[in-house]
Structures are given as structure tokens and as C-alpha cells.
Amino acid sequence: MRRFLLVDGYNIIGDWPELREMQQSDLEGARDLLIEKMAEYQAYTGVKIMIIFDAHMVPGLGRKYRNYRVDIVYTKEKETADERIEKLVRTLKRVDTEISVATSDFLEQRVIFASGALRKSARELRTEVGAIEKGIAKQVLRVKKQTARTKLPISDEMAEIFEKWRRGER
């Protein structure tokens, strides 16, 4: 089964406290951070991510590009992210496809649900992303511990000393 998550970019940025705060002084940085988090989500879950941004924040003709293997869509100048998401749901919807839409816009959630897509609030997505980040951190720690092992029975303290020597640290 193919699985998609369509993310209403500015809606999520406006809802997540860390992104909302960053947006005040660095909108581009907030967008980039959201894209990075969604790339991790995609890599960890295997769900295909598309982030849709309204053109009113970035005027232009509308464009689509890929960053970290995530599809980023900027709507056309007179088109809202909600309208583009609705079109994408209709285009992608098939029997073998599961589509979820991440937004906290209640009206949009109702329209999406009526179209056959699943809805996910910004808070739910943030909770999932947090759990994924913790899972990734645990995996990284486990790999570090496995690669630090040696065939000689030495204490962790000695292994740390040897590792510092290996890196040229004192």
C-alpha cells in the first residue's frame, strides 16, 4: 500500500511553538527546519511526504521541488494550500493508497475527511515527530556502543581513553 502525508506547511509552522517563534524573525529558517523534520519522519516511517506552502508568503507562479527527498510545493499566487491539498487528495486517491493530511484547520480537516483522506492535527504530528526523534537517538546510541566494543575485555573508562587517543585528543 502506498502511503502519503500531505503537510499544510504554514499551518504547522504557526502551530508548533518552536517553529512559530522562529517564524517571527526567520521564516525561511522555520520552513527549512520543518522540511528537515519531515525528511526524518519520511525516512523513519517510509510514508511519502509532500509539504504544501501558500504562495501569499512567497509570491510567485507556484513551483514544486525536492529537498531531502521530500516534495515541497508552493501554490500559485491565487491558490491556497487548502485548495492544492484538496486537488492532491483527489489526484492521489486510489484503492491501494492511504492519504493523511496534517493541518489544524478544522474546516480543512472536514473537507479532507469527506474526500476520503485521513486527518492528522498539528499536535499529533508534533508528538509523532518527537517520538521518532527519540527513536533515532536511541538507534544512534546503540550503534555507537556496538562499534565501540572490542574483543579485549576492557572497562568503559579505558575504552574512552583509547578512543580519545585514537582521535588525537588528550
Image (tube, rainbow, N blue to C red):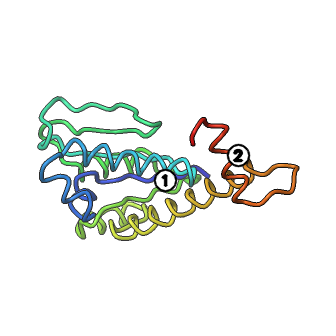
In the image, which disc is placed on residue 24? Answer: none
Q: Residue extending furthest front?
A: 170
Q: Nearer the viewer, residue 44 or 160?
A: 160
Whether pointer 1 and pointer 2 mark residues with C-beta atoms closer than 8 Å, the reply is no
Percent across and percent down for residue 132 are 52, 61
**What residue appears at the point 18 percent right and 48 percent down from the top-left corner?**
80
State the separation of the CA atoms marked 1 and 2: 36 Å
Q: Nearer the viewer, residue 127 or 118?
A: 127
Relative side of 34 to 152, left or right:
left
Nearer to us: label 1 or label 2? 2
The residue carrying mark 2 is 162
Q: Nearer the viewer, residue 71 or 137?
A: 137
Relative side of 88 to 60, left or right:
right
Q: What SS does tag 1 mark?
A: helix
Q: How many marks?
A: 2
**What residue appears at the point 27 percent right and 45 percent down from the top-left corner?**
31
Around disc 1, counting alpha carbons within 10 Å, would you say few (fewer than 14), some (14 to 19), or many (20 or more)? many
**What residue appears at the point 45 percent right and 37 percent down from the top-left corner?**
68
Percent across and percent down for residue 144 are 66, 51
Quadrant where the C terminus lies? Answer: top right
Relative side of 164 to 30, left or right:
right
Q: What SS does tag 2 mark?
A: helix
Q: Nearer the viewer, residue 129 or 65?
A: 129
Amino acid type of the residue tagged 1 in the rendering: Tyr
Around disc 2, counting alpha carbons within 10 Å, would you say few (fewer than 14), some (14 to 19), or many (20 or more)? few
Percent across and percent down for residue 53 are 24, 45
In the image, which disc is placed on residue 41? Answer: 1
**What residue appears at the point 22 percent right and 53 percent down from the top-left corner?**
10
N-terminal of the pair, mark 1 or mark 2, is 1
Relative side of 138 to 5, left or right:
right
Amino acid type of the residue tagged 2 in the rendering: Phe
